[in-house]
Image (cartoon, rainbow, N blue to C red):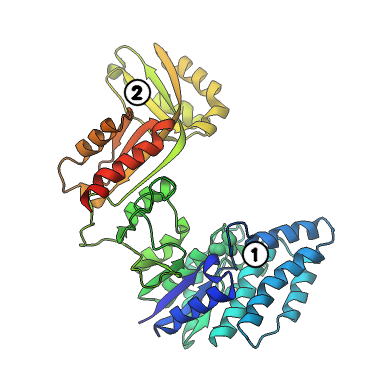
Amino acid sequence: MIKVVKFGGSSLASAEQFRKVADIIHSDESRRYVVPSAPGKRFSADTKVTDMLYGCYELAAKGKNFDAEFDAIKERYNSIITELNIDLDLDKEFDTVKACFIGRAGRDYAASRGEYLNGLVLAAYLGYSFIDPAEMIFFRDDGSFDADRTIKAVGDRLVGVERAVIPGFYGSMPNDTIKTFSRGGSDITGSIVAAGTGADLYENWTDVSGFLICDPRIVEDPQPIRTITYKELRELAYMGATVLHEDAIFPVRKAGIPINIKNTNKPGDAGTFIVESTSQKPLYTITGIAGKKGFAVVNIEKDMMNGELGFGRRVLEQFEKNGISFEHMPSGIDTMSIIVHQEQFGEKEQEILAGIHRNCHPDVIDIETDLALIAVVGRGMKSERGTAGRIFSALAHAHVNVKMIDQGSSELNIIIGVSERDFETACKAIYDIFVLQQL
Ligand code: ASP
């Protein structure tokens, strides 16, 4: 059995957190490959080492002095090393990094050193081998990630390596310079290592006990989701619910490896399993609720619209020409509504409206702004009658006016449009009817 374990920045922010991480790893011998992030925040006003590195490099790139900022980074690592009594001296490494900053080795190189140095510390603390991902995680000349080459290289490199620490977040370009993934990218490294080693499980350790049914900033102490499918996760993540980098799904999904989101501070909690499919019934009819503000609706009316061949295409063409993608498109016989991201749309609004007027000759176009969309997602909805009814009666009781409804053909989600000022009330009402009233 092989488990790949990735620990996020808050899990490795201090010596105390390092101890928890080591206990977790030592408590299960199948936890053989460890992917660390850079040290994150120790308290809410703290700064992540990655951000300290970006700041420092910015000064270096402008030719300014960055000694004080660099010393603060050294101190983050040295305090962990000293407190844990690790037999390791990073001075030479720090000197190299500093020299490379002065030599303008690049922003990606700078940021990657957060994971690199943390990997050295963790490997020494655990007594594991250290493997630099620059040797086996590859990007192409155009900056895209070379998944096939990488997964093969990871597999080859780790054959016969019993236990190793592999820093997250970066790999190398064909010219051997360092390139990072986007922010939060250590999740992707973990997924790649899991796929490359053919692991049985990818454990992603963070500071929450899994994916929550609803945003904890809206609902107090929401229940965690025990099991979620990739499809459900995508629906919720698209609406802004995130614990995992979106690109981290692909490598493990392709290799059929489940992900378990776990809490370093509460290792006994089951966390969330992310799987391709499952026979496990969700505890509630819905799996999760997520939503976003900032949408606008373009309402178009024209008498006899339904008989006019190509009308919809001509309308959508105006959005396409201006580079605006639409989110939803509910329609009636003589009306259609296009829901778009308000900010993006705002920049092209007049061009699009003029295009619709010229090409489609509508009777009326009107725009409504400040709309929020809420996705109620759940594989359990398909087999249960009355889900939509329950949502709408809950919203009616909470005095929320529903402006739009859209149900995907897969019956995996129901999307509801409400006014932004009703957003929180609506999420709470839906959580209440499906979760609280069933506890
Ligand atoms: N340290 C990087 C960041 O802060 C990558 C990661 O933690 O996944 O974005």
Element marked by disc 2: strand
* The C terminus - image quarter: bottom left
Which residue is depicted at the point 27% across and 17% down? 307
User: Can the viewer see residue 103 in this picture?
Assistant: no
On screen, residue 266 versus residue 433, left or right, reads right
Dots 2, 1 in contact, CB < 8 A = no
Element marked by disc 1: helix
Q: Is residue 338 above or below residue 57?
A: above
Kind of residue indicated by mark 1? Val
Q: Give the mark nearer the N terminus: 2 vs 1.
A: 1
Q: Position of residue 171 (x, y in %)?
A: 59, 68
| Nearer to the camera, 213 or 193 | 213
The mark lying in front, picked from 2 and 1, is 1
Q: Position of residue 109 (x, y in %)?
A: 68, 65
Q: Badge 2 is on which residue?
A: 336
Q: Is residue 24 above or below residue 73?
A: below
- Look at the numbered disc 1 and say if its residue's Cβ is closer than 8 Å to ligand 1: yes
* Quarter of the figure with residue 10: bottom right
Which residue is depicted at the point 57% across and 79% down? 122
Q: Badge 1 is on which residue?
A: 49
| Nearer to the camera, 224 or 219 | 219
Which residue is depicted at the point 25% across and 34% down? 392
Q: Is residue 154 above or below residue 162?
A: above
Query: Which quarter of the rendered image does ligand 1 occupy?
Result: bottom right
Residue 120: mark in rendering: none
Q: Position of residue 31 (x, y in %)?
A: 42, 80
- Look at the numbered disc 2 and say if its residue's Cβ is closer than 8 Å to ligand 1: no
